[in-house]
Image (cartoon, rainbow, N blue to C red):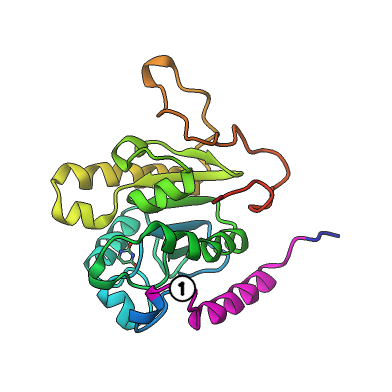
Amino acid sequence: MTNEPSPEERASQLRALADEAATCVRCGLSEGRTNVVFGYGDPDADLMIVGEGPGQHEDEQGLPFVGRSGQLLDQLLGEIDLRREDNVYIGNVVKCRPPGNRDPRQDEIDTCKSYLREQLRLIDPKVVVTLGNFSSKLLLRTDDGITRLRGRAYEWWGRFLVPTFHPAAALRGSARVLEDMRSDFGLVADVVAGRLEIEEPATPSEAPPEPPPEPLPETIAVAKPTFDQLGLFR
Ligand code: URA
């Protein structure tokens, strides 16, 4: 006997959460939105991708990453033999479009993050990919920027987290950004295929970034903690 909810129960809870979010007015972003962009994909996915927030196309269609950034994301997924329809779930830090595509504000992120926390808990992916600064800093609880954070897989609450650039940065940036993203997606492929083990502490010459204000868990292998117990997102 186990108390773990079945995949069907988790899918049903995720649908209920999406229904709740559809009428959310917890923050001012609700005033300008066309649709809440809750998330898309397999509720039992091994890979969960977390972006920043919906843009214009996402707001119009109610789906994440359907514009140019989404095309690039699909391409990068395809290069590691993954498709968003299959074993992947895509969500965002904030579920409603910030006006004029401005950055989400901290109060908006704080108000919205319980949805993301629940998505992570219910989907329970093997690996989380954070795209860009907002999701990477939120989930790794650090002020370090994405350039510093990317390039490795972090042990994260019993799974891996791979931070990488936001596809929009590759679209407006140099070819180097895209190559770095390809390399990070290579790490993702390794985790999904079970080829990556929990990392040993880095040697001094390849020391990890400064620890975040509140330490990340060293690991992991313990019985799965609940996100609330561990104060995630506090
Ligand atoms: N950028 C994001 O961060 N999320 C989307 O859904 C689309 C573009």
The furthest residue to the right: 1
101 vs 154: above or below: below
* Residue 188 higher or lower than 70, as above or below: above
Taking depth in this image into account, of 138 and 222 the one nearest to the observer is 138
- Looking at the rendering, the stretch of residues picked out in magenta corresponds to 4-29
**How many labels were placed on the picture?**
1
Residue drawn at (37%, 71%), measured in percent from left and top? 64
Q: Nearer the viewer, residue 116 or 104?
A: 104
Classify residue 184 by image quadrant.
Answer: top left
Visible in this render: residue 87?
no
Quadrant location, the N terminus: bottom right
Crowding at label 1, few (<14), some or many (≥20) Cα neighbours within 10 Å? many
* Magenta stretch contains residue 176: no
Q: Amino acid at mark 1?
A: Phe
Which residue in the protein does label 1 denote? 38
Relative image position of residue 114 (x, y in whole percent): 55, 63
Dominant SS in magenta: helix
- 50 vs 3, left or right, is left
User: Is 17 one of the magenta-colored residues?
Assistant: yes
**Identity of the residue drawn at 41% across and 65% down:** 94
**Residue 78 image point, x, y percent:** 33, 59
Q: Position of residue 42 (x, y in %)?
A: 51, 69
Q: Taking the image as four quarters, which one is ligand 1 found in?
A: bottom left
Residue at 53% in and 57% down: 46
- One can see residue 191 in this view: yes
Residue positioned 29% across, 53% down in the render:
166
Farthest residue in the top direction?
204
Place of residue 178 in the rendered image (x, y in percent of width and height, measured from the top left): 21, 48
* In the displayed structure image, the side of residue 210 where residue 121 appears, left or right: right
Foreground pick, 143 / 181: 143
Q: Quick one: SS at disc 1?
A: loop
